[in-house]
Image (spheres, helix red, strand yellow):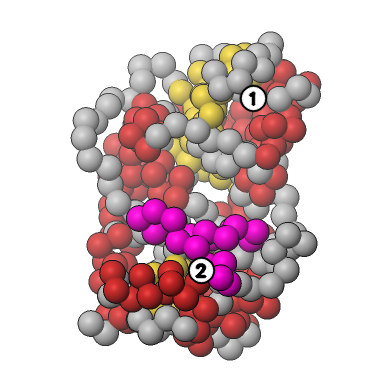
Amino acid sequence: MRGGDTRIWIDGEFSHHPKQVAASLRWLKENYDVIHFGFLCPHPTKAYPTPDFLPVFTDLDLPKTGTITDGYWDDYAEWGEQCIPYLNLITTSGMHYAQALIERGIPVQPLGIPFLPGTGRSYPRDREPLLIWPNQWKNIKGINPFLDAVPSLPDELRVELYSCGIRYYQLRTEDRWLDAVGEDKLFGFHGRGRATYFGNVDLPRIRTAFQRAWFSVCFQGIATRKAAYKAGSYNNTELEALYYGALPILHESALGTDLPESAYRTVETGDELPDVVARALRDGTVKDSERLRDARAFVLDNYSAYTQYETIRKAWRL
C-alpha cells in the first residue's frame, strides 16, 4: 500500500479507510491463515498524514511477517516502528537494507531477494551483441549517466530499454534522451539515437530479454545520499541477469555486496561503460561458460524463493 492510497490489493480491493477497516479485518480473519507484508508501510505525506493502515497490524489476530526491500527505512521509520511489535518476523532483501534497523536495535533477518526461475520456452542469446536496461527510470538507478554513455557504446552493440518511471517522462524531450534513443515504442517520443525503448512489458517478455541479452546495466549507487546504497546494493534485475545469462555491469559499490566478483563488471562513472563493454566483448568474458555456470549456481544456492518461504513459514508457527 502506497502513501495516500486507501486500498490494499489482496485478491481484489481491501479498504483500510477508517469507516471500512473493521469489515476488512473480519474478511481477512475469515479467509486467511497468515499475513505477509511484501512492503511494510507507507510514509507520511501531505495527502496521507495519519497511519490509517495501522489496524491491519494492531487489530488483526493472525500471524504476521513483513519484508523491507529498500534503503529508505529512515523515511518511514516513524510508522514502521509502530508496525514491528506486531510481526513474528521481519526480513530484508539483503544485509545492506538491514543495517539501519540493526542500528536501532530492531531484530531483523536478512534473507536476500526471493528468486523464482521462470517457466516456459527458453530463448538463445542473440547472435549480435545486445545490451538491455531493465530497471526503473529513477535517479537512484543511475539512468542519467547510463543514457549519456549510450551514444559511445561499441558500434556492433544493439541497445534495448525497458521499464518506466518518473525520469522517462522528464527526459523524453531532452537532448540526453534524443541522443540516446531512436525509437520510442511506448508513446512515440523518437530521437536521433540508437536505443529502442519498450517501456514496461510483462514478465515472460522481460525474461526473454534477459536470455537474449549479452549485457545488463544498473548503476544503483552511482549518485545517492542513502547509506544503504553507498555501501553496495543490488536488485532482482541483477539476479535475473546472472541466472539467465546476461553479464551485469554495475556501479563499483556492488563490490561491497556478496555478489561473486567474477560474475559481473563494474564502473566508477558512466563514462567507463563503453570501454567495459568493449573489453568484455574482446576477452570473451560475456560468453564465458564457467562464469555463466557459476553465476546461475550462485542465484539458486542463495536466493531460492522456496527456501525463503520455509524460513518465513516457520515464523508463522503453524
- Asked if residue 86 lies in the magenta stretch, the reply is no
The outermost residue toward the top is 192
Residue 173, horizontal then vertical, whole percent: 76, 22
In the rendered view, tell whether residue 15 sits above or below residue 87. Answer: above
Residue 18, horizontal then vertical, whole percent: 58, 72
- Asked if residue 3 lies in the magenta stretch, the reply is yes
Q: Residue at x 52, y 54 (%)?
A: 234
From the viewer's perspective, is the residue at label 2 or at label 1 nearer?
Answer: 2
Residue interval drawn in magenta: 1-20
Residue 179, horizontal then vertical, whole percent: 71, 18
Q: Main secondary structure of the magenta part?
A: loop
Which quadrant holds the C terminus? Answer: bottom left
Give the quadrant of residue 203.
top left
Disc number for residue 150:
1
Q: Nearer the viewer, residue 167 or 57?
A: 57
How far is the residue under mark 2 from the one under mark 1? 50 Å
Q: Nearer the viewer, residue 153 or 241?
A: 241
Q: Secondary structure at mark 2?
A: loop
- Which residue is identified by label 2? 20
